[in-house]
Image: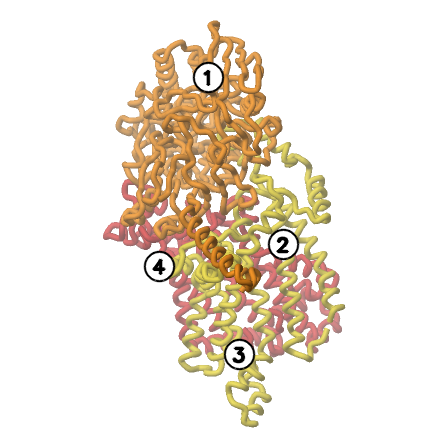
Chain colours: A yellow, B orange, C red
């Protein structure tokens, strides 16, 4: 299995190479000019040209790509054009909130969706099933920011149970951390929950129709034990797959959630950087996301062997 | 456990442990009384660059006012007042200024402020700033006489030296340590070491989220009461946090809930959300407000044609623009002058062309007369800037009504300012009209008013050519009295109605909202954080 | 999804296509929600086409003096912050949102289909293309779309292109895995052995049997594209605001949610309803075309 994992990791290098080239070229061709933004409204063109030169933005494509790649291979992600801070510092500052938000959302979504999906499958065709599926479909038909605003209006503004915005690090206390995380995780998690619930139900239905489940029932095993002990384990693979694919979905939603709740995370960092043309940040963050995505998928694939011993690497 | 068990069980130790407990209680109680006051402020934008000379962004200017100090400042009566300077003299031949610094001025790194620091800072500022460049043109030399005194020798008498050094808005001649001020003016500095009333805490800076300042205990404020940027700058809170909240609804809710203390600029539409809250006050603390403007591209068809620009002037309705931008007549009104209304040089000469009844028929006739052949007109629109966006939508509509083939080019602000530097025709990526706005202090006089120039391609974007306007501007610099200055300003305005370098669209004030636990907010065009107390 | 979810298909295309439609009709009748979904979608398409005749005025006409009025007889949905009639904007907004949804679904599936079909068969292309697809998929789609739109300018075409690009890799993966399975089928092997040329094999044998799952995928892409457009508008990188879309109407008014909630409510309802109905339609089609698919998806 270790060899498989290493082989997969090695195979990610060409993928990351593609990503790096693609993103860099995209930004290079983009019409925006950070030098103009920096110079401000009243500046003249010579001002802008000189600023551009001092930032190294007037060099040809290959020179800039080469410089960036070389620095990258030495672990230097570059420096933000606007703030002058190293990209790695900026990312480091913002990783924690996004990580916290993503993990909380994952926990909330999985903890709620899997049992709901299992329940719906167990009572297939009944009211619970239809109810869960109806809510699930609704869940991914409403845009994330509408959900977010609705939650804020109800729980933070009207009822005043939870704070309106912001992020409180877990090092400053578990209570404030949780209270600031609840609304964003739920808002972000609803879409994710809907997806997972549907897959869980479908996968469970598939498995429950299998012979060995009937045998387990015949043996006299309690229905609950059949569900969790036998069925769920075997249904796990598609569920875990969708969780992996869903991570990419999550990141898109994270951007919106971070904006509405003023959470200082990577999603907002990236969007701000894109709109301002702060190239080094965009490049650095994109590589980071790709690396995460590749890693997550590797973990998902490796976890298959946990759930299905027949799969061996 | 812990401390008490370490102290031991011997007879004397009981007394000792009791007194230790007692001392700890006192300490805790004491610190509860002396809780540091933190002001949580929601700024108008995200602070990205720390260099107020490198960029003209207002947010960086505001940051500058926190950590740096200035030699002179303008007070609420538009008078120049000394700030870091103790005494200043002008020689009889009006060619030499001598400045002496106050006592006790120190930078945040402990070094005293010296004459050399001031000279280096001014020279760096002069390389980028419009007014500074004029000053540099007139300068013969700067010399440091000793650590606290320095001299400026001019080539010819120039009455605006102090006005230039007291310039309130971007770029402000902040004083930095010489070693930092020696950085090239086109490269950003990375340290924020100044001599101002607050210190910048770089370790806690999270761009896009939080900027932290603490009170500068070594700052020696002037004795006079504060008046705009002049007078005593007493920091009355221990710590300031700038918390950037990009979403307006979220910011309003945060202020209502007390999670923040002061929202610098709030969209007027959200006033009803805060008005019901007894703990929140909404005010207009900015006496001058800001001016919106419509700028033509004078290099390309069709607006290189004066008659067509005059036609547009006939139908611009400042009332519409004011409401679109400010939402409420209280916060926005017409200002039919090329200088900020409410300042000395603002006047109403020739303003009827903008304030009179809008005449669509006459405008349409003028369009025809100009020989306009239906060429496409591109109006740049930055959808992420509500003030620019609102103006662009109005203008597009208005142009179409008089038969001009106008099209909006929507983009974000960054793309807009890139595109507006293009001098090409519209089919090659050029533009015909864009909108922006300036804070009041930025267009109070011909020195600062960069849109009101006629220097052709050397001018600010739009590039109007009008030698007469330039002549008048030069004359203003040499005007001997205030009355002469006013007269020249009127002449310039009269000329501008004719040649239409740009059209002012409205004067608007963006209200500020704060919790009633705050007091001492200074009424001025720039938001200053000294003198503000928190209960 | 990687599971090859199609059963061994019946005989050659024409007859298979016929049974396809019959199956579809039959099962759809048993799924009232799918029919409801289809009807609503059709309704929205009609609204989009006939917007000028639905009692609307010029959606772009600004009148600042009439800003932020609540719903009334003259303005059924009220006016927005520039005095524009919200009802008209919502009706015209259907054009953009529905167009974006359908266009992205079309472009995405056609492109994905083309690439997937070819890479399934041509070995050496497969390796390169899949690496590129992996690369594209690992960039979060919202960020990819924002970056692409910043690259060009904000226009309807570019928005469609940007969202479609993000969806293509998933379609390619789906088609490719289908093709890989189908390739092993005896009749396909026979066709190759008998010397049939590749294009003909693709069109006659492979393509018809990929249609069903691809069609289902297309409906989900359509729904997701409409939501993505709203999210892009929210961030500020969506369709230019002088062309109203449900997404950008909501985005422009978002700070006014507590002052003039109807500005978000009406476009929000229309958007959610349309997306919901497309999703239901997709579910119904999926159930109809392959019951086993139902239990996998």
Q: Is residue A173 visible?
A: yes
Q: Are marks 3 and 4 in contact (CB under 8 Å)?
A: no
Q: How crowded is mark 3: few (under 14 residues within 10 Å), some or many (20 or more)?
A: some
Element assignment for label 4: loop
In the picture, the quarter occupied by the C terminus of chain C is bottom right
Identified at 41% across, 32% down, the residue is B526
> Mark 4, residues whose alpha carbon is within 10 Å: few (<14), some, or many (≥20)?
few
Q: Is residue C117 above or below residue C284?
A: above
Marks 3 & 4 on one chain: no
Residues at discs 4 and 1 in contact (Cβ within 8 Å)? no
Q: Which dot, 3 or 2, sits closer to the camera?
A: 2
The label shown at residue A160 is: 4
Q: Is residue B94 above or below residue C182?
A: above
Whether labels 3 and 1 belong to a single chain: the reply is no
Q: Which of marks 3 and 4 is in front?
A: 4
Helix, strand, or loop for circle 2? helix
Q: Position of residue B260 (x, y in %)?
A: 40, 48
**For residue B49, which numbered disc appears in the image?**
none
Residue B141 vs residue A256, the one in the foreground: B141
Q: Name the residue under label 2.
A: A288
Say if labels 1 and 2 share a chain. no
Which residue is painted at 42% across and 52% down in the image? Answer: B29
Q: Nearer the viewer, mark 3 or mark 1?
A: 1
What is the chain letter for disc 1?
B
Give the numbered dot on residue C291.
3
Q: Can residue B411 be seen in this view?
A: no
Q: Mark 2 lies on which chain?
A: A
Distance from label 2 to label 4 (Cα)? Answer: 37 Å
Q: Name the residue under label 1.
A: B87
């Amino acid at each position: 299995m270790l060899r498989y994992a290493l082989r997969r990791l090695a195979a990610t290098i060409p993928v990351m190479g593609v990503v790096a080239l693609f993103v860099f070229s995209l930004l290079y061709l983009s019409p925006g000019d950070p030098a103009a933004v920096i110079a401000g409204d009243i500046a003249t063109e010579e001002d802008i040209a000189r600023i551009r030169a001092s930032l190294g933005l007037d060099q040809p494509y290959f020179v800039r790509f080469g410089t960036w790649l070389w620095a990258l291979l030495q672990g230097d992600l570059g420096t933000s054009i606007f703030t002058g801070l190293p990209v790695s510092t900026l990312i480091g500052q913002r990783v924690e909130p996004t990580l916290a938000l993503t993990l909380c959302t994952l926990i909330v979504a999985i903890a709620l969706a899997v049992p709901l999906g299992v329940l719906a499958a167990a009572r297939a065709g009944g009211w619970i099933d239809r109810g869960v599926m109806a809510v699930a479909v609704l869940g991914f038909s409403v845009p994330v920011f509408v959900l977010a605003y609705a939650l804020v209006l109800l729980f933070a503004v009207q009822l005043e149970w939870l704070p309106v915005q912001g992020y409180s690090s877990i090092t400053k206390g578990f209570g404030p951390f949780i209270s600031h995380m609840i609304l964003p995780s739920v808002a972000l998690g609803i879409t994710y929950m809907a997806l997972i619930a549907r897959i869980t139900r479908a996968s469970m239905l598939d498995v429950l129709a299998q012979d060995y489940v009937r045998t387990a029932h015949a043996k006299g095993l309690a229905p609950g034990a059949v569900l969790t002990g036998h069925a769920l384990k075997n249904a796990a693979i598609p569920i875990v797959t969708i969780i992996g694919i869903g991570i990419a979905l999550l990141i898109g939603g994270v951007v919106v959630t971070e904006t509405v709740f003023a959470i200082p995370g990577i999603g907002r960092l990236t969007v701000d950087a894109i709109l301002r043309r702060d190239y080094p940040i965009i490049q650095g963050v994109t590589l980071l996301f790709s690396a995460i995505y590749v890693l997550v998928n590797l973990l998902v694939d490796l976890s298959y062997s946990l759930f299905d011993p027949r799969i061996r690497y | 456990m812990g401390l008490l068990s370490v102290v031991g069980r011997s007879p004397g130790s009981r007394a000792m442990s009791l007194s230790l407990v007692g001392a700890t209680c006192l300490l805790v109680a004491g610190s509860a009384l002396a809780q540091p006051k933190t002001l949580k402020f929601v700024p108008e934008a995200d602070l990205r660059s720390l260099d107020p000379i490198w960029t003209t962004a207002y947010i960086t200017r505001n940051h500058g006012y926190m950590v740096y100090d200035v030699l002179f400042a303008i007070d609420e009566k538009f008078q120049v007042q000394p700030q870091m300077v103790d005494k200043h003299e002008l020689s009889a031949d009006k060619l030499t200024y001598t400045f002496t610094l106050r006592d006790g001025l120190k930078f945040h790194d402990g070094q005293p402020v010296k004459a050399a620091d001031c000279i280096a800072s001014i020279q760096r500022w002069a390389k980028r700033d419009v007014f500074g460049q004029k000053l540099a043109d007139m300068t013969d030399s700067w010399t440091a006489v000793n650590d606290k005194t320095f001299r400026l020798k001019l080539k010819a008498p120039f009455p605006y030296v102090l006005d230039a050094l007291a310039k309130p808005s971007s770029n402000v001649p902040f004083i930095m340590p010489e070693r930092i001020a020696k950085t090239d003016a086109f490269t950003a500095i990375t340290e924020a070491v100044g001599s101002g009333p607050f210190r910048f805490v770089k370790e806690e800076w999270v761009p896009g989220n939080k900027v932290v300042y603490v009170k500068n205990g070594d700052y020696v404020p002037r004795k006079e009461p504060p008046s705009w940027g002049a007078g005593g700058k007493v920091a009355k809170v221990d710590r300031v946090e700038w918390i950037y909240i990009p979403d307006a609804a979220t910011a309003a809710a945060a202020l209502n809930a007390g999670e923040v203390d002061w929202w610098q600029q709030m969209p007027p539409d959200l006033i009803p959300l805060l008005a019901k809250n007894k703990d929140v006050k909404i005010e207009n603390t900015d006496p001058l407000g800001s001016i919106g403007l419509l700028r033509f591209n004078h290099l390309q068809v069709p607006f290189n044609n004066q008659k067509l620009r005059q036609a547009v002037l006939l139908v611009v309705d400042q009332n519409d623009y004011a409401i679109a931008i400010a939402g409420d007549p209280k916060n926005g009104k017409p200002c039919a002058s090329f200088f900020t209304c409410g300042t000395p040089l603002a006047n109403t000469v020739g303003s009827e062309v903008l304030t009179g009844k809008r005449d669509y028929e006459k405008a349409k006739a003028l369009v025809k007369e100009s020989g306009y052949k239906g060429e496409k007109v591109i109006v740049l629109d930055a959808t992420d800037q509500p003030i620019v966006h609102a103006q662009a939508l109005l203008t597009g509509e208005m142009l179409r009504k008089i038969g001009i083939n106008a099209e909006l080019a929507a983009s974000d602000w960054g793309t807009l300012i890139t595109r507006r530097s293009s001098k090409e025709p519209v089919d090659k990526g050029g533009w015909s009209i864009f909108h922006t706005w300036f804070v009041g202090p930025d267009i109070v006089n011909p020195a600062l008013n960069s849109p009101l120039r006629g220097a052709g391609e050397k001018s600010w974007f739009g590039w109007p050519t009008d030698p007469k306007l330039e002549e008048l501007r030069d004359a203003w610099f040499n005007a001997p009295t205030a009355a002469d200055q006013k007269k020249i300003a009127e002449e310039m305005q009269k000329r501008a109605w004719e040649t239409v370098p740009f059209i002012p669209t409205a004067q608007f004030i963006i209200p500020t909202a704060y919790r009633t636990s705050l007091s001492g907010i200074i009424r001025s065009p720039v938001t200053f954080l000294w003198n503000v107390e928190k209960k | 999804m990687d599971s090859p979810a199609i059963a061994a298909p019946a005989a050659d295309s024409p007859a298979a296509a016929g049974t396809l439609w019959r199956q579809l009709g039959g099962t759809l009748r048993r799924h009232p929600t799918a029919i409801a979904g289809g009807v609503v979608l059709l309704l929205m398409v009609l609204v989009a086409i006939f917007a000028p005749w639905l009692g609307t005025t010029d959606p772009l006409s600004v009148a600042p003096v009439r800003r932020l009025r609540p719903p009334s007889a003259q303005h059924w949905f009220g006016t927005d912050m520039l005095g524009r009639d919200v009802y008209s904007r919502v009706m015209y907004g259907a054009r953009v949102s529905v167009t974006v949804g359908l266009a992205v679904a079309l472009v995405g599936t056609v492109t994905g289909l083309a690439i997937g079909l070819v890479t399934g068969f041509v070995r050496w292309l497969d390796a390169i293309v899949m690496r590129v697809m992996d690369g594209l998929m690992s960039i979060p789609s919202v960020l990819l779309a924002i970056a692409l739109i910043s690259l060009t300018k904000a226009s309807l075409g570019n928005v469609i292109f940007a969202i479609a690009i993000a969806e293509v890799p998933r379609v390619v993966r789906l088609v490719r895995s289908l093709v890989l399975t189908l390739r092993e089928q005896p009749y396909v092997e026979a066709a190759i052995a008998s010397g049939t040329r590749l294009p003909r094999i693709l069109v006659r044998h492979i393509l018809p049997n990929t249609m069903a799952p691809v069609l289902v995928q297309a409906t989900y892409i359509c729904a997701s594209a409409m939501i993505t457009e709203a999210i892009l508008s929210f961030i500020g990188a969506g369709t230019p605001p002088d062309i109203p879309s449900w997404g950008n109407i909501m985005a422009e008014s978002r700070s006014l949610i507590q002052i003039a909630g109807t500005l978000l409510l009406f476009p929000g309802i229309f958007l959610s309803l349309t997306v919901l109905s497309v999703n239901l339609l997709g579910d119904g089609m999926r159930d109809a075309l392959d019951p086993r698919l139902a239990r996998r998806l």
